[in-house]
Amino acid sequence: MEKIKNIIQASIDTKNAILQDPLLLEQIQAVVETISSAFEKKHRLYFCGNGGSAADAQHLAAEFSGRFYKNRKALPAEALHCNTSYLTAVANDFGYDEVFARLVEGIGEEGDVLVGISTSGNSPNIVKAFEIAKAKKIFTIALTGATGGVLKTLSDTCLSIPSKDTPRIQEAHILIGHIICQLVEEKLFTSV
């Protein structure tokens, strides 16, 4: 029983650290403005991640393209790993490090937004995708752990969770993702 309480407390402590970080809170608000503005200008939102972060990427994309709280029009958001034929072909032909970069190169346009989710901030396939995105003037947002990793220097905004514990980082990523979804939806659909 004590172990369960300790795990829950560690999650609470991570979220309290976010709550007490005014810079991180300001960055979250700025991301809300960036994504809202991109949607208002008819641009698209892309997500990428690996493993549990791929699940989070898919989850958050669905919140935008489906709905969060409001029944409203769909927003153009998608996770880049969902086409398994594409993913396995590119991984086989070019290497797994290229799977997101080639898709960003193929469908990403200036003014779009790319969110990369990586607890370490060092996932090579997300790093390469961010390099392509920068060249195409796609706004990049990284969701990482405490150090930010390589993505910290490549992203326009890096939301670094103040933790080095992967499960606690992932729990905070989905919290922040939900906050962003809710606030973007409220901003764009005030009358719904």
Image (spheres, helix red, strand yellow):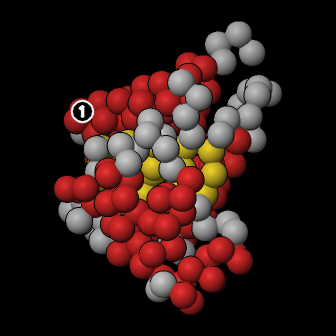
Furthest residue toward bottom: 92
Is residue 143 rendered to the left or right of residue 109?
Answer: left
Type of amino acid at the residue the image marks with label 1: Pro
Is residue 185 rendered to the left or right of residue 22?
Answer: right
Name the foreground residue: 142 vs 103.
103
Q: Secondary structure at mark 1?
A: helix
Residue carrying label 1: 22
Crowdedness of circle 1 by 10 Å Cα count: few (<14), some, many (20+)? few
> Is residue 62 shown above or below 23?
below
Q: Is residue 172 visible?
A: no
Residue at figure coordinates x 75%, y 41% from the top left:
66
Residue at figure coordinates x 56%, y 53% from the top left:
107
> Is residue 67 shown above or below 55?
above
Q: Is residue 59 visible?
A: yes
Is residue 22 rendered to the left or right of residue 7?
Answer: left
Choose top left, top right, bottom left or bottom right for residue 81.
Answer: bottom right
Name the foreground residue: 19 vs 191.
191
Report x, y in % for residue 116.
43, 57
Is residue 149 rendered to the left or right of residue 115?
Answer: left
Report x, y in % for residue 37.
48, 25
Query: Which quadrant of the figure contains the C terminus?
Result: top right
Report x, y in % for residue 59.
64, 55
Residue at figure coordinates x 45%, y 66% from the top left:
101
Furthest residue toward right: 71
